[in-house]
Image: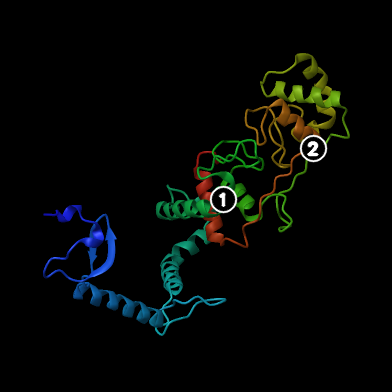
């Protein structure tokens, strides 16, 4: 008597009552041609019908410049626009108040609700428009020309009014005639290599960094003749001109010998855009209050 398990798959005999097979065989196992459950089939057909109905009623099929609008005219963008308009209407009174009051009066003591709204709105505005350059925490990007807004070193002043002006008009841009402007001379073709080397050491010396004493002594006269007009005789800088303080440990482009030499030779020319055309006055005032509150404001 032959054992069916040892037979070749093609020689296997179906049991009585077994359904027909599909003809597929894997390792001796035949695939029965069982019909799908009725509930599964109707569910499948229902999803197809729902999908077709959805593409008719709602935006669905992509066109060249848009998509089919659908018979219901539904638009998620329109819904978002309505929500934004609703909240803008709700916040209109306090936004108008921010625009009207003196900047110095927007503080936690005199106007706690107004101050809270300005801080939260300013933080959102900063995260959207300013963090790309100044960093999410406002610490800037060291040695890359993006200022740290947390410290107490401000080229044009750190009062809330000063910050508001800077945000409004920007720095050294071509879009706003009222932009803050300063331009350092490039001394590569004005001073000799020896003079540049000596003034670099002098600047490092007055900023309490390690420096060559002999070169620093020679660099003092070079500094007084070429740099003191903007940075002042003691190197403390001039905010009115946007000339940085060279005696502290805060460097916009780095305080190493290489960084200072590059600055002396080729100058620096950082640009900040004006924000009056992109942000409302309330948003500019809010972000000025927020930046001022970070710890470095004066």
On the image, the x and y values in percent for residue 237 come to: 71, 34
- Which structural element holds mark 2? helix
Helix, strand or loop under label 1 = loop
Residue 80 in sight? yes
> Taking 289 as reference, is 210 above or below it?
above
Q: Which residue is mark 1?
A: 130
Name the residue beneath numbered marker 2. 266
**Residue drawn 70% across the image and 53% down it:** 179
Is residue 235 among the parts visible in the rendering?
Answer: no
Q: Residue at x 72, y 53 (%)?
A: 173
The location of residue 49, given as percent across then percent down, is 32, 80
Instruction: Say the numbered circle drawn on residue 88.
Output: none
Residue 82 in percent (x, y) is at 43, 73
Left or right: 269, with 112 as reference point = right
Residue for point 17% across, 53% down: 5
Pick the residue in front: 42 or 204.
42
Badge 1: residue crowd in 10 Å (few <14, some 14–19, many ≥20): some
Q: Point out the residue furthest to the top here.
A: 214
Residue 286 coordinates in the image, percent (x, y): 51, 54
């Amino acid at each position: 008597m032959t054992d069916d398990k040892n037979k070749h798959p093609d020689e296997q005999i179906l049991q009585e009552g077994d359904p027909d097979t599909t003809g597929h065989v894997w390792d001796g196992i035949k695939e029965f041609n069982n019909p799908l459950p009725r509930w599964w089939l109707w569910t499948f057909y229902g999803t197809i019908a729902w999908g077709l109905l959805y593409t008719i009623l709602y935006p669905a099929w992509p066109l060249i410049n848009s998509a089919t609008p659908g018979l219901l005219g539904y638009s998620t963008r329109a819904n978002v626009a309505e929500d934004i308009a609703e909240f803008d209407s709700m916040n209109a009174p306090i936004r108008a108040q921010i625009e009207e009051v003196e900047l110095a009066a927007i503080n936690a003591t005199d106007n706690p609700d107004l101050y809270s709204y300005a801080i939260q709105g300013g933080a959102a505005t900063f995260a959207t428009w300013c963090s790309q350059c100044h960093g999410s925490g406002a610490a800037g990007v060291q040695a890359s020309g993006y200022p740290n807004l947390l410290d107490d070193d401000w080229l044009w002043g750190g009062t809330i009014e000063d910050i508001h002006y800077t945000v409004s008009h920007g720095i050294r841009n071509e879009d706003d005639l009222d932009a803050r402007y300063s331009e350092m001379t490039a001394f590569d073709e004005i001073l000799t290599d020896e003079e540049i080397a000596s003034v670099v050491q002098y600047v490092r010396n007055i900023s309490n960094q390690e420096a060559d004493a002999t070169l620093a002594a020679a660099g003092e006269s070079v500094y007084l003749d070429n740099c003191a007009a903007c940075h002042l005789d003691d190197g403390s800088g001039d905010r009115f001109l946007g000339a940085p303080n060279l005696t502290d440990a805060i460097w916009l482009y780095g305080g190493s010998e290489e960084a200072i030499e590059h600055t002396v030779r080729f100058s620096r020319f950082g640009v900040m855009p004006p924000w009056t055309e992109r942000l409302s006055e309330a948003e500019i005032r809010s972000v000025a209050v927020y930046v001022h509150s970070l710890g470095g404001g004066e």
